[in-house]
Image (tube, coloured by chain):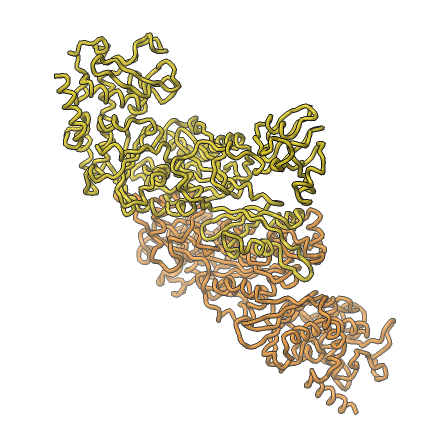
Chain colours: A yellow, B orange
Amino acid sequence: MPTATFLPGYRKAVVPSGTTILDAARAAGLPMNVVCGGQGKCGKCLVFIKDGTVSFDTEDCRRFFSNNEIASGACLACRATIVGDVRVEVPAESLIQEQKILVEIPGMKEVPLKPAVWKYEVHLTPPSLDDTTPDLARLLEGIEGQEGPPPNRIYAPLEVLRYLPQVLRRSGWHVTGTVALVPGGYRLLNVDEGDTTGRLYGAAVDLGTTTVVAYIRSLTDGRVLATASNYNRQISCGEDILSRVNFARKSGLSRLQQLAAESINESLKSASDAGGIDLEEIFEVVIAGNTVMTHLLLGIDPSYMIAEPYIPVVRRMLSTAAGRIGIAAHRNAGVYTFPAVSNFIGGDIIADILASGMADRDEVSLMVDIGTNFEAVLGNRDWMLSCAGAAGPALEGGEVLFGMRANPGAIERVRVDAGTLTPSYSTINGIRPRGICGSGLIDLIAELIRACVIDRTGQINLEIDNPRIRRGPYHPEFVVAWKKETSIGKDIVITENDIRNLIMSKAAIHGACMTLLDAAGLTPRDIGRIYFSGAFGNYLNKENAITIGLIPEVPLERVENIGNGAIAGANIALVNRERRKALDGIALRITYIELNTEPSFMDRYTSSCFLPHTDLALFPHVQQMLEACRARQG
Amino acid sequence: MPTATFLPGYRKAVVPSGTTILDAARAAGLPMNVVCGGQGKCGKCLVFIKDGTVSFDTEDCRRFFSNNEIASGACLACRATIVGDVRVEVPAESLIQEQKILVEIPGMKEVPLKPAVWKYEVHLTPPSLDDTTPDLARLLEGIEGQEGPPPNRIYAPLEVLRYLPQVLRRSGWHVTGTVALVPGGYRLLNVDEGDTTGRLYGAAVDLGTTTVVAYIRSLTDGRVLATASNYNRQISCGEDILSRVNFARKSGLSRLQQLAAESINESLKSASDAGGIDLEEIFEVVIAGNTVMTHLLLGIDPSYMIAEPYIPVVRRMLSTAAGRIGIAAHRNAGVYTFPAVSNFIGGDIIADILASGMADRDEVSLMVDIGTNFEAVLGNRDWMLSCAGAAGPALEGGEVLFGMRANPGAIERVRVDAGTLTPSYSTINGIRPRGICGSGLIDLIAELIRACVIDRTGQINLEIDNPRIRRGPYHPEFVVAWKKETSIGKDIVITENDIRNLIMSKAAIHGACMTLLDAAGLTPRDIGRIYFSGAFGNYLNKENAITIGLIPEVPLERVENIGNGAIAGANIALVNRERRKALDGIALRITYIELNTEPSFMDRYTSSCFLPHTDLALFPHVQQMLEACRARQG
């Protein structure tokens, strides 16, 4: 049976002779635009036969297509049938666009599409003895007058000049030039034969220590075409940042550089396969990562960041060509890495800030990004303070007996009946529970407070007569799920020791927030908005986070989850060159407060080692709730 | 005997044990600065012992040098004696500078030194917990306030960021940064340990079809440190431009690119050896070449220039990094190629214009560059017209029976006694004549006119009774040197046919000049200055050039030889960034007139096929001279 190969994505389908190209495209997973239902009436299913044998009525074509298009192999996919192996180019406009939209970043609709890369289709007058303008000047004159960069500021790199004369002549002087804004001007990235203006893509990447996430967008209309994620392959050289830096110090820098690029490429490749996109047509890549990840990706030594006095090599936004660091996009595509404030406040946090919009407003916002470490930023358009610290592993499920990451089977939400103390819970993917993840742990502690099972120090009241409250092998514990409900053949419990570890984690975060507020001379009442970022923040119950004192108490409607702020910020910087340009300014505006050398932090931490806090006046609504609970219990 | 190696130039001398470093340096050809005559009293002959064994009194050193210098191996060259093999670094300031000055370009003194590259020595405060500024920002803050580029516009390429942290720490935070003006901003090219501000070099290159010439200059004071020249190695792929382009078309482009770079490198290497300069410390290379040479050097296809409609790929000034095209300088050094007007008016002619200064004046100038081809430019600061054509080989000694290039043994100047018709001549290198080169041929024809041996059509008057005038095997001829005077065992003659060929060559040039004047609505009287460029122009007798009608007649004092204008222009663009910046504007201001399609040119050419011209009114002084001669002869 013949094989139909669809360009530019190289999707294939093996179909019987006589199949229409439309059906073959469907079989290859390419949903085509057939307004008339495939009756040859609308002319929307234009494809170009690049080579191979097909059968079709040329009359059909003449009704819809120009002579030039017909000369390029244009035909109607619904009317042409496949005779032998065939290669078919499917223009973007012939595909159903809606079906390609994937997960959109919240708030992206409000970001105007102003990319830093442009495509220009030009039909040039061929040179003659009366018009001997050189090839490059002729191309730039063709661009003149079109929207975008002024042609006299467009710089053409040698590499493009080396193939330009051939492309111009082979195409019959009909080409598409790709031009990007670069520091100090504009660069001619590429010149294609014919009209490729419909295919101008960009990628936004979150380069996390553990996970890489990539979005591919059309930069002509801003739509998300595909997303993908995978593990950071550097994990093979060390799980955490510190071990990676140590690996880099032992001559492993170039290996880590390569692995960072490969990790990003893995995401870009899956996304481009899913979206039917040629990686060569990605002309911009915007990458948000923490300071060490950014150094490693660029092959810059991060060694001096892990020992006193903890100095990064560079914090400003950097740009380089994809080909120079091995990123799988057009080799001249600009790769932009987010700027950083310090070792600890990296490009991922600047991306959070961009995603939240807090740097554009007068209102004071507090941003908290929680992972193994936490980062907090307080401020507004005029000033920003930041700090960072180790949250401890408890909130990610570490140092908790039945703690686990947010994987299938993790209890992610819990309610506890105040009378019977019976928990009701939901698990990730809805399967039998295997453990409890961060959001579940926060819910659980908040609910146990409300039910008066634990006191403000986190101690379990063993005097309550309920089978779920018992003395465990080492510590008092509360049974969340009985053995028979679980998939692990054991009771899932939370122990007093688990609760103590969780209190220390949340106290570090709350203490940091209070330190920032103090430094700014503000109180929680002055906070207009609190943002949670990080995968963890996505599933967090805001009320419970306040109940346990993870963050300062503010009215609930002021708390917002922005999810993965790093990928959101990268997307914004990809589609809007003005927001991208503002990033260095944002980074420079942020003052970093080192908690280890800030004497007041330890006091604030200690004061926060209660549920919700030593000073209940800081948590007036939680105080009311606690009083109500106590009253109910008598 | 021990060997003393002197850095940075790697000059060596093998000397007996006990020789002072001063004497060893003299033996190695390095003239050192010894104000006190080598008595250890002035401290000017500072050198650093890098390794090896020398004997010296540390007391001497302490009198003149800092502890840091002593720690780096400082000693007085006049007091330290060599014990075994030794490597000695000689700071530039310890050398006698005057003796390094080589051939200077005329007029360079009036060009202000404003290079496009700067070195900054900075002593940085090491980072601390209280000052965690990143490495790059710390370096740029150190530059802040020094003369030159604003630090916030300095872009640091990845490559420098990759070694920056090590250099900063190894040097104890005392480094020298090299920054260059690049399109759209500034680039941090390099960071060295310690103070290297004394060693900032640039190269100016004339990339000719036949010959490459290179000058190396200090960009701190503008002095010429060395010059060198050699053949263009592309000659192995074809002698003339056309055969090179044809070689490029047959997959030979990358070979020609490589040969162009190697040819330049050969010159740079000889010059750097002669000047004791490390090629790695050349941070800018400015190259003037014709349009095809420039395309080939950059690896850009010149094919479309040699067939109708004769289109170059690019005419603007291009810049790239030395490492990218294989030029032997610092790999990040900017390589700048002169812009062109067209295929025929290339960067070499723009360099001529720069060297002449004609584009800066109100006065109208005419520039004529003569080689196998000729180029002519007429104009001033407001407008310029140009044209080009084949001069024919006669002026280079081709198609002339005893013609030769300006090599040793060529008759380069001739006078002919009007009475006896005995020529007196001088030859290149003063050896017995082997033939006649271009300047000699022009002298000879002018003298034969004055002596009434030839008439205005170039016909030899056989009626004159003189043994030097005779009927040769094919044509009438005049004997310039008898067999016994020559080194070739033959009479050296000039034939009527030779003279005809020379008249056709000169007529093409004069006709072109007249075409430009006509196009501008001017006459020879409007020409304020005529410049001759090209190696040929250097030896030309101006009066004789006018006598034969090679150029329009103007008062003699208005004619100037600028010699190799290409290398002169390249030198100017190297030392003065403002003049370099003006080049694209000059090139764009020049209108190119295609002589082949200009109907009036053939008429002007035909009218010029006389000595000096059909219309003697155009040559009033020559007319007077002819009348005087005729009167004298009766």
Position of residue B44 relative to residue A205, above or below, is: below
Find residue A597 and report its image quarter: top left
Which quadrant of the figure contains the C terminus of chain A? top left
Position of residue A86 relative to residue B432, above or below, is: above
Find residue A41 and report its image quarter: top right
Q: Is residue A168 left or right of residue A541?
A: right
Q: Nearer the viewer, residue B116 or A325?
A: A325
Tell me residue A361's x, y (percent): 30, 45
Tell me residue A130's x, y (percent): 67, 62
Which quadrant of the figure contains the N terminus of chain A? top right
Q: Is residue A498 left or right of residue A186?
A: left
Find residue A514 and report its image quarter: top left
Does residue A292 appear in the picture of this structure?
no
Does residue A541 appear in the picture of this structure?
yes
Q: Nearer the viewer, residue A432 or A91?
A: A91
Tell me residue B433's x, y (percent): 73, 70
Tell me residue B522's x, y (percent): 63, 78
Q: Nearer the viewer, residue B123 or B579?
A: B579
Q: Is residue A289 left or right of residue A370?
A: right
How many dots with numbers? 0
Position of residue A209 relative to residue B9, above or below, is: above
